[in-house]
Amino acid sequence: MTQLGALIKRNCKLFFKDKGMFFTSLITPLILLVLYITFLAKIYRDSFADAIPPGFSISDSVIDGIVGGQLVSSLLAVCCVTVAFCSNLLIVQDKISGARRDLTMSPIKSSTLALGYFVASFGATLIICFVALGACLGYLSFMGWYLSAMDVFLLVLDVVILALFGTALSSLINCNLSTNGQGSAVGTIVSAGYGFICGAYMPISNFGEGLQKVLSFFPGTYGTSLLRNHALRGAYAKLSELGVPEKIIEKIKDGIDCNIYFFGDKVELSAMYGVMVATVVLLILGYVLLCRVRKEKG
């Protein structure tokens, strides 16, 4: 445990010491929030307005609360994964600098070394994602606050699970990389593509039926839906109080991926948590096995 603690402390210190990487990781979610508000808010607002039948008067506060909930859930869904890939680049940097070779020649076990990278990356990712969550909650309090204490708690839980998912996925991928070019390429691909395949930029309900079925196999889809449900539950309850029919509310949920269907069957929230937890476990096992195989070969 002493070796593991020293490794975690060393890895965290190196990440936060790299001012460029740290501030980029920290500022990126805030920049994304501004970009989402600027470019996506109107699209989300128009989509919501089209779903409300004529004759219902919905206050701007409720509309802003729904649009804000959709925006922050999209932001958090993306950041929890992309930030993890950034914080996990230390695995690659240590290979380039030769520090990884020095560490493997020491009495430290390879499993301890791998766990040290994982825990440090998860901790750094979680800190940055919590900062992003705080900014998102501040934005919601300004736009329209319909969250209960339980909703906030569940949002925190969702962020923790998605940060674990991002850390496990990035650990499995980054441990195979050995150059800065490879790390940058993977980071660029993840940053550009993940938001689309998880339904953060555009709800998967807007895609074709075939693509929807394909994306229903991606765990990130369920992570985004969890955030959506918990960020918007209070706003949906307010719509119900205003007399909006349940069928219309369900239609809105379908349109923004609060309701996810797996080959026609609605996926319950408990099942979404099951998918995310099972995926995290499988990715961690894959990371451990890969590290063991690489040790046997090397």
Image (cartoon, rainbow, N blue to C red):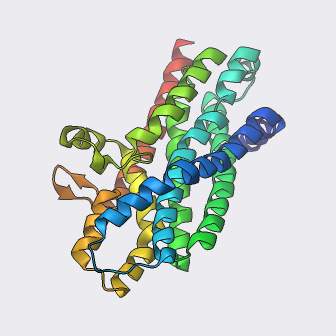
With respect to residue 205, does 287 lie above or below? Answer: above
Residue 59: x and y, percent? 46, 79
Query: Residue at 79% across / 37% down in the picture?
Result: 10
Query: Residue at 48% across / 26% down in the picture?
Result: 290
Picture quadrant of residue 265 = bottom left
Picture quadrant of residue 9 = top right
215 vs 228, left or right, is left
Residue 250: x and y, percent? 26, 69
Picture quadrant of residue 105 = top right
Q: 113 and 173: which one is in front?
A: 173
Q: 243 and 284: which one is in front?
A: 243
Residue 97: x and y, percent? 76, 16
With respect to residue 205, does 153 lie above or below? Answer: below
With respect to residue 230, does 94 lie above or below? Answer: above
Q: 57 and 244: which one is in front?
A: 57
219 vs 126, left or right, is left
Residue 181: x and y, percent? 62, 15
Q: Is residue 239 visible?
A: yes
Q: Quadrant of the C terminus?
A: top right
Q: 84 and 289: which one is in front?
A: 84
Q: Is residue 179 visible?
A: no
286 vs 92, left or right, is left
